[in-house]
Amino acid sequence: MADGIVAGIDVGGTFTDLLLRAADGRIRLAKVPTTIANQADGVLAAIEAAGATPATLDLIIHGTTATTNAVLERKLAKVGLVTTQGFRDVLELGRRTRPNPYGLKGTFEPLVPRELRREVPERMDARGAVVTPLDEAALTREVRALRDAGCESLVIHFLHAYANPAHERRAGEIARAIWPNGHVTLGHELLSEFREYERGTTASVNAAVQPVLDRYVTRLQEQLAARGHKRDLLVMNGNGGTVSARLVSREAAKTVMSGPASGVMAAAATLAQTGLRNAITYDMGGTSTDVALIAGGVPEVSAELSIAYGLPIHLPMVDVRTVGAGGGSIASLDRAGMLRVGPESAGSTPGPICYGRGGTRPTITDANIILGRLDPARLLAVANPVSLDSIRDVFRHDIAEPLGMSVEQAAEAVIRLGNVHMTGAIRLVSLSKGHDPRDFCLFAFGGAGPLHAVALAREIGIPEVLVPARPGLTNALGCLVADLRQDFVNTINRGLFEIPEGEIAATLAAQRDRGIAMIQADAPALEEIVVLHSAEMQFRGQTHLIRVALPRADMALTDIQKAFEAAYFARFRVELPEIRAVLVNLLTTVIGRRPSFPLSALLDPDARQGDVEAARIGERALYADGAWHQATVWQRERLPEGAVLHGPAIIQQADATTVLEPGSRAIVDVIGNLRVAP
């Protein structure tokens, strides 16, 4: 069964991107400026720009930065928290880390201020036995006090609710009868895992973004419905799956990193149809760069994301590392006269100087203009064109003259320093985890990724760069190809051979059944449901956890021990046969696979030419490696399959520009990817 007419829509910091797959399989696309004040307006504008209406769409899948931005900018709902007596300061004490590890000073503002963190008598022990009964009168009193203090969301977070949630469940019943809205988060429902700090922070993030996401999704659904859309809306989660808009705000924290995750899922789908299995994804947008790793065709997933200092979110999410280096990253000199690039960004408003929206500070995008890497006449969403001389004057005054450089040298220095930040993120997801970058390709996308990818690959030693057919719309493609997904975790935290026979299988079966039920309730059209089990384990006395795949839910304990020892040896090349393992967490992932489609549909068959020379559109001066070169300019949409291009060259298309550095070589593959040997 097909989905019908499907739109994948990604809202980024600068642009809102849309890919629409029509009933005949053809793809339409749109790219419009993000409407910061109300992102729903940009979504509707993108649908209109693609020549569609909400009434004609059978399915909309939406990736959003609403929750991510809300947390980063601290534009959050007012949250109250009720916890076990004696533990109100857990969120503030954390793990004895510091905001500035090597400094003597640092400030940290917890998500829930101390006066809104209340205590009630109750206590379970770590095995789930009642130590102190729940004081229901005290709970009622504290919930009312938080409501009267103007809190919009409430968190119930008891110390050992992961072992026995009875007190949290009863507290939830009482609180929901008092609370004026549905924004009540029970910690164990979101994350049934030990470690009260991480569990409490995760629940607090959920409560803080719940009203923000609920208002946005409700507003978007109302505006879509007013224009005739009668179907459900699916929203991307940070784990790379989707969930119904009816349910998404209940577990709103899961949408953090939704946008970056969608790009990684698009990369995985592209690799599958290209015949590759290993890639480092590199998504450079207007405000930041996101990097992730795909090994064996599967994106790396982590449950230990920390979106900012003191805000760990222990929910399974695609392991994306972000650095503040994007096209809008501002270049400046610090008080010592040293060049700095980012993390401050010009964003979409006012944006880089070349956008003509009032930007006055030099950015990476402006540096690319000066060096001939971008054509100023082809920039999207330019309000008032700015002359090249005006951009050069800003670089001359702000950077070149103070550093004793030419304008070209200053612009190249800005790009190289931005590249340093991005190569650091690539090393973080590869070398720091024991992966050799030479075993991977660099999957470059985003509006600016292909501009820098060849230089980054050379710096790190990556042997191949893959630029997909629509690099500037890859996150929207991720929405289009995303499956439905639910992740579950339960803490066991006992020696492996102390666990009673059948408990592991029963726990995994309960997780599986819950996930299947949730996905079947949301399923628009599914090809299959896939269930994946795993365990997080450690040797007794250690603190770090190793993820171990469990092929079957009913594995014998000895087989689980062997699987853990093998995973430990693969990671650390150490054998410890005399130490027994501790099984800390059991995890289950349930994936509802939606129908796939050939990514060659992203190509416009009417635009492709039979002769590579028909794609040549001219030459342009390109500054690289300290000198000017004459670069051939190609129109990517016209390039035929098998076309071979040599650097220096510039490959232009509607949504991105790819730069082939001098000495590099590219070939166009069967589904339109550029395969570049740096």
Image (tube, rainbow, N blue to C red):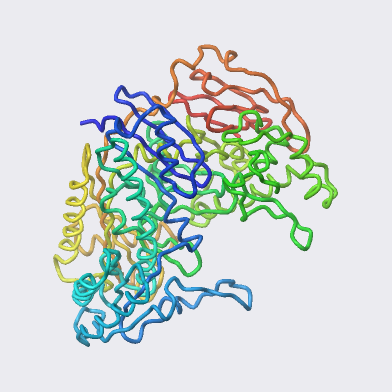
Please report the residue visible at 70 percent of the width from the left and 51 percent of the height from the top.
Answer: 331
Residue 251, horizontal then vertical, whole percent: 31, 59
> Which is nearer the eye, 289 or 640?
289
Residue 243, horizontal then vertical, whole percent: 29, 49
Q: Quadrant of the C terminus?
A: top right
Give the tally of numbered discs: 0
> Which is nearer the eye, 230 or 471?
230
Please report the residue visible at 34 percent of the width from the left and 58 percent of the height from the top.
Answer: 252
Q: Quadrant of the N terminus?
A: top left
> Which is nearer the eye, 451 or 127?
451
Up-down relation of residue 616 to residue 155 (above or below): above
Q: Quadrant of residue 574?
A: bottom left
Residue 189, horizontal then vertical, whole percent: 25, 65
Residue 138, horizontal then vertical, whole percent: 25, 85
Left or right placement of residue 650 versus residue 46 in this view: right
Please report the residue visible at 77 percent of the width from the left and 63 percent of the height from the top.
Answer: 335
> Which is nearer the eye, 93 or 296?
93
Up-down relation of residue 632 to residue 94 (above or below): above
